[in-house]
Image: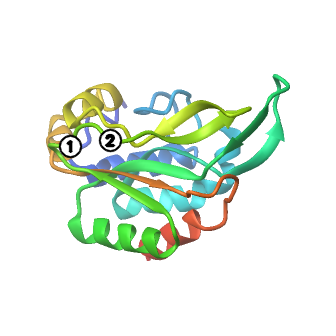
Amino acid sequence: MGNPWKKAESVADLGTLMADWLEGRLGGWTPDYLDDRPDEETTHLIPVLAACNRAGFVTTNSQPGQPPVRGYDGRTWRQRAWVVGWIADGALLNKVRTAAKRAGMTAIAHGPSSRGGNWIPLTDADGEIQMAAGDYLGHRRVINSEWSGIGRHATNELRHATYLELIDPVWGRDDRLWPALANAIR
């Protein structure tokens, strides 16, 4: 079968492959996710993430909101609901951003010439930031690090797409971002 990612001709193809990976129909390596399957904490998000990918919002990372909980290391961990990915379709981008803003989410869109930004903490342990979003290294660097091994045509389309981050500003809340996304892609 070879590398299906290498055969991707468009961002839409990448979305179909990512949805198949999320749902367990495509095994092995996948861009950006650091495992061969989604983390267990993401299981309840798979239906909406797969639908987003098939609609053209190609997600490359996400996490559910998690209220403060004592972790494996004895520290108190918490996280914000968050998703990041690529959208090549301007109409879809507008729908997703509008739905997210109506739901009270923070939407950060990076275009092909974007650089920089401000860090927004996503996960912390006893107040120490463990993961953050918002800062951006630029399309070329992100595409090279997240999407090496995909088809040339899909890479070219990504260069003109928007890199979108959606963040729930409320720590631990997990019931606003995902329904907003589901409504936007209908």
Which label was assigned to residue 138?
none
Distance CA(mark 2)–CA(mark 1): 9 Å
Q: Left or right of 85: which side holds 50? A: right
Q: Residue at image x 57%, y 64%?
A: 178
Q: Position of residue 143 (x, y in %)?
A: 26, 33
- Report which residue position mark 1 lands on: 114
Assign a secondary structure to mark 2: loop
User: Which quarter of the rendered picture does the N terminus lie within?
Assistant: top left
Q: Left or right of 38: which side holds 93? A: left
Q: Residue at image x 45%, y 41%?
A: 133
The quarter of the displayed image where residue 107 is located: bottom left
Assign a secondary structure to mark 1: loop
Asked if the residue at tag 1 contacts the one at tag 2, i.e. Cβ–Cβ closer than 8 Å, the answer is yes
Q: Residue at image x 32%, y 36%?
A: 5
Q: Residue at image x 40%, y 46%?
A: 17
Relative to 129, residue 44 above or below: below
Kind of residue at badge 2: Gly
Relative to 30, residue 69 above or below: below
Q: Observer-nearest residue: 14 or 180? A: 180
The answer to whether residue 47 is visible is yes
Q: Position of residue 37 (x, y in %)?
A: 59, 35
Q: Observer-nearest residue: 53 or 28? A: 53
The answer to whether residue 2 is visible is no
Q: Position of residue 90 (x, y in %)?
A: 22, 66
Which label was assigned to residue 117?
2
User: Which quarter of the rendered picture does the C terminus lie within?
Assistant: bottom left
